[in-house]
Amino acid sequence: MWTALWHRLAHPGHFMRWSGAATPWLAGLSALLLAVGLYLTWFVVPPDYQQGETVRIMYIHVPAAWLGVFFYGAMSLSAIGTLVWRHPLADVAQRAAAPIGAAFTLICLVTGSLWGKPMWGTYWVWDARLTSMLVLFLIYCGIIALWRTIEDPNRAARAIAILTLVGAVNLPIIKFSVNWWSTLHQPASILRMGGSTIDPSMLYPLLEMILAFTLLGVTLHLYSMRTEILRRRVRVLTIREAERLDAGAATASMVTPPRSMPVGQGA
Amino acid sequence: MDLGQHAGFIVGAYAFTALVIGCLVIGGLLDQRAQKRALASLQGESGERLS
């Protein structure tokens, strides 16, 4: 039953129908959750005893970091879908996710730097966590650039799926870098053995912001997937139209000999 | 609200985030509108309709 449901949802025609109905609701819910999250972040969350007001940067930095990794994980799953099942929607999902994942990774890097300067005394250190996030951003950029380079969509899909899976090695490095190496970046404080180390007055607003960012990211992804499907339809129709015009021109040239041809030499 | 001596960093972080997310949203809307227009124009020219 689940397989049948999955196939039905993943069919491009069905996808356009259900995503078209769901996107406005998801967008509204994302806006509402973001508004609530921002209210909590700015007016409810107390200043940290060490970081002071600067802790408010964490409420965008942590969700952005999560989404940067989340979208790369989603792209890796899509890459398997492209390589194993050659499902057209898998490639569409992967292509639509890359710019969104790159944008959230960039937000993570910049907001982390803006937090680091007042807290660590520097915008950047070549720490394992920071460097692995920078590598993630560069992989996103490489994937986006490769898509623009390869003309044939099928070849591009396979090449990028392989590159994406190779780059997925970076995901566990990002997660465990703070445990494997001595880093300036603090160790895990939300998902860790023994529970979170964050006080509930700060933890729940942070989880709310993570939920709001995730819903926003998923909404943007669905919307971008719809655009990508339309772009592929435009491409197919453009090629078909060009072929039709070519065929028309060839027929016309066969019927009407050019003026410059000597009489009797036309087809 | 008093953000203290690091207000510039806090406001800067939120402003940059708003800018990037704003670009994602507006860029996405414009891109889809352009594709819909191109599709409508092509379907009009060829008399075809792909659903």
Image: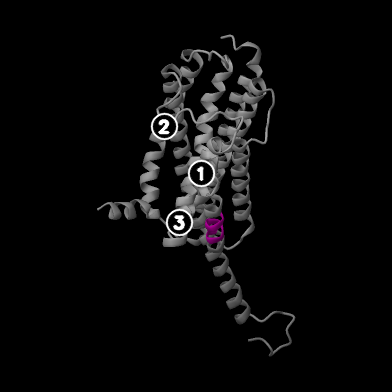
The structure residue drawn at horizontal position 60% and vertical position 76%, both measured from the top left corner, is: A250
The structure residue drawn at horizontal position 55% and vertical position 39%, both measured from the top left corner, is: A180
Instruction: Return the disc, 2 or 3, that comes first in the chain's sequence.
Output: 3
Query: Principal SS element in the magenta part?
Result: helix
Magenta stretch encompasses residue B35: no
Q: Is residue A142 left or right of residue A89?
A: right
Q: Say what secondary structure mark 2 lies in.
A: loop
Residue A186 falls in image quadrant? top right
Against B20, residue B42 (above or below) is below
- The residue wearing badge 2 is A193
Against A110, residue A12 (above or below) is below
The structure residue drawn at horizontal position 37% and vertical position 39%, both measured from the top left corner, is: A22
Q: Say what secondary structure mark 3 lies in.
A: helix
Name the front one of labels 1 and 3: 1
- The residue wearing badge 1 is A172
Report the disc number at residue A80.
3
Please state the horizontal and vertical placement of residue A181, each as a whole percent of the image.
Answer: 58, 37
Q: Mark 2 and mark 3: span between their CA atoms?
A: 31 Å
Against A230, residue A50 (above or below) is above
Q: Say what secondary structure mark 1 lies in.
A: helix
Q: Are marks 1 and 2 on the same chain?
A: yes
Q: Which residues are magenta?
A: A157-163
Please state the horizontal and vertical placement of residue A176, each as a whole percent of the image.
Answer: 52, 39
Q: Is residue A250 visible?
A: yes
Nearer to us in this view, A59 or A103: A59
Nearer to us in this view, A51 or A41: A51
Q: Mark 1 and mark 3: span between their CA atoms?
A: 18 Å
Which chain letter matches label 3? A
Which chain letter matches label 1? A
Crowding at mark 3 (Cα within 10 Å: few <14, some 14-19, many 20+): some
